[in-house]
Image (cartoon, helix red, strand yellow):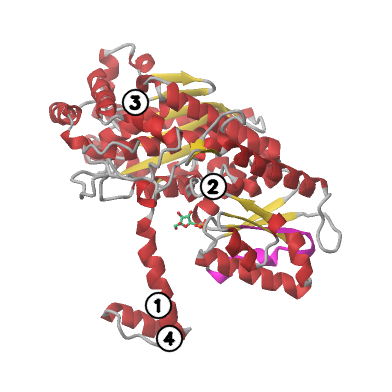
Amino acid sequence: MALPSINPTTTSAWKALQNHFNANKQIEIKELFSKDKNRADNFKINWEDFYVDFSKNRITEETFNLLLELAEQVKLKGAIAAYYSGETINKTENRAVLHTALRRKESDTVLVDGENVMPEIFAVKAKMETFTNEILSGKRKGYTNKSFTDVVNIGIGGSNLGPAMVVESLQYYKNHLTTHFVSNVDGDHVNEVLKKLNPETTLFVIVSKTFTTQETLSNATTIRKWFLKHAKQEDVAKHFVAVSTNIEKVKDFGIYQDNIFPMWNWVGGRFSLWSAVGLTVSLAVGFDNFNKLLKGANTMDIHFKNEDFNNNIPVVLALISIWYNNFFGAESEAVIAYSQYLNQFATYLQQGIMESNGKTVDRNGDKVNYETGTLIWGEPGTNSQHAFFQLIHQGTKLIPADFIGFAQSLHGNQEHHDKLISNYIAQTEALLNGKTKSQVLDELKDLNLSDSEIKDLMPYKVFEGNKPTNSIFIKKLTPESLGKLIAMYEHKIFVQGVIWNIYSYDQFGVELGKQLATSILKDIKFNNSDNHDASTRNLLEFFKKLR
Ligand code: F6P
């Protein structure tokens, strides 16, 4: 079964939402709270160690019901079943989308083209476990018989962002290995990393689903050359492993069969950290913790698959986001995690969300007549409060925000943690309530300002409030809870793609730039600036003079 191809704007639920929006666009969240004493309890989901409060949104009971009706009318339930069961829902690439299978139990059955893929998944997991344990215990050693101290992940996009974000987020659970990530084709990136390494004790993990990516192959080649300045060709086998679907290309590069960790076409790059792409994660925090990450994600998968939509965290978050994106015209969303560990989380989500849902053509092949993918951005709190929060509070743009917090600190510094969480909660309250003229007046009077000074300052000091937020409060940052959180956003992406009637699992939009870069590289090599527009010609000339 393919995904349904329903233009959402043709559904009666969408039309009802439009009318409802027209009649209620001035909606004040503050007023909704004063009218309904049960609002905070009605608009929350308590699930496992997650508490998701979505009451601070511009939604009423009616909005919520209409959004749920929209999900029904675009046949979301059937789409979820197709997603989990290995249907070819990535139609433009003729592939299933099965990152969820990577986190399932061994006894489950998931069929791709009639074949159960679970045994293969568990064979690769077993290989990852053995390899991780041998590296960590020192059983596997480098070419001078020393144990490994460092691991370098060489990859870009989904072959970098997921592992890098998870290693950073789970830093607390890390072992003695020092991890590094080389992604950019910028030679200064690889050289800065190489500066810190001892070839005798460093393991290199080349991660590339296709094994054709310019950045990764350039970095891997440069690193191998550097390695061979110190070691011999036969030592490569001890220090280089690869993760890819393209086994032949990996072998051509000189990686031994035993050192290859396979992955599959039905795992999208940006959803691949759960596969052997997560090898660096497994090495950094141990295989048990990697497995816990997968278990957490699987718990969220089960919740998403089985829970009624009104109590289903990814569905609810996706619907609320559609309400702002498609009716209020909000262009972006912020993700603010009150945890320094999650400082790469927004960057990671940018690929997942924007590479998936940045599409203009619908599943009928027609140009959409409504907005699709949201822009996503963010930085951890409290740092972000001192950077861009001014714009969220008093700027002209509507920026719905997810606030993520953990009730327990990992190092147990309660004094700091209380301060951190007071900021987390305070910001969502400030964004909701704002500051009225009479509150400002009282404050300014206390400062003994004159009436005319108060009058002049007043407009700048008022906060309109009514800024929507979701609070995602989690007991503690653990491999399991991180797995749940990442899977929650993966499923939000899926729901939005289904509703917007687009294909979320291809990424043709990244190809054109890659093609042009290849031809411009030739032009640079052969000193040729013909066949380009005048601006591009000038840039090539400028580079030629100064390189
Ligand atoms: O930039 C496009 C992209 O194809 C991403 O989707 C992918 O994660 C990244 O490049 C890296 O690709 P690969 O793992 O094949 O090297």
Asked if residue 291 is positioned above or below residue 184 in the image, the reply reads: above
User: Does residue 462 appear in the picture of this structure?
Assistant: no
Across and down, in percent, residue 315 comes to: 37, 29
Residue at image coords 22%, 41%: 329
SS at mark 1? helix
**Position of the N terminus by quadrant:** top left
Across and down, in percent, residue 382 comes to: 49, 39
Horizontal side, residue 96 vs residue 415: left or right? left
Nearer to us: label 3 or label 4: 4
Residue identified by numbered label 1? 520
Q: Quadrant of residue 248?
A: bottom right
Q: Residues within 10 Å of mark 4 (few under 14, many from 20)?
A: some
Dot placed on the residue nearer the N-terminal end, 1 or 4: 1
Dot placed on the residue nearer the N-terminal end, 1 or 3: 3
Nearer to us: label 3 or label 2: 2
Q: Are marks 3 and 4 in contact (CB under 8 Å)?
A: no
Q: Nearer the viewer, residue 343 or 210?
A: 210
Task: Using the numbered discs, state the Cα–Cα distance from disc 4 to disc 2 in whole angstroms.
Answer: 37 Å
Q: Start and end of the magenta stretch?
A: 186-206
Asked if residue 266 is positioned above or below residue 59 in the image, the reply reads: below
Residue identified by numbered label 2? 162
Checking the image for residue 544, the label placed there is 4
Asked if residue 388 is positioned above or below residue 422 in the image, the reply reads: below
Q: Are marks 1 and 3 in contact (CB under 8 Å)?
A: no
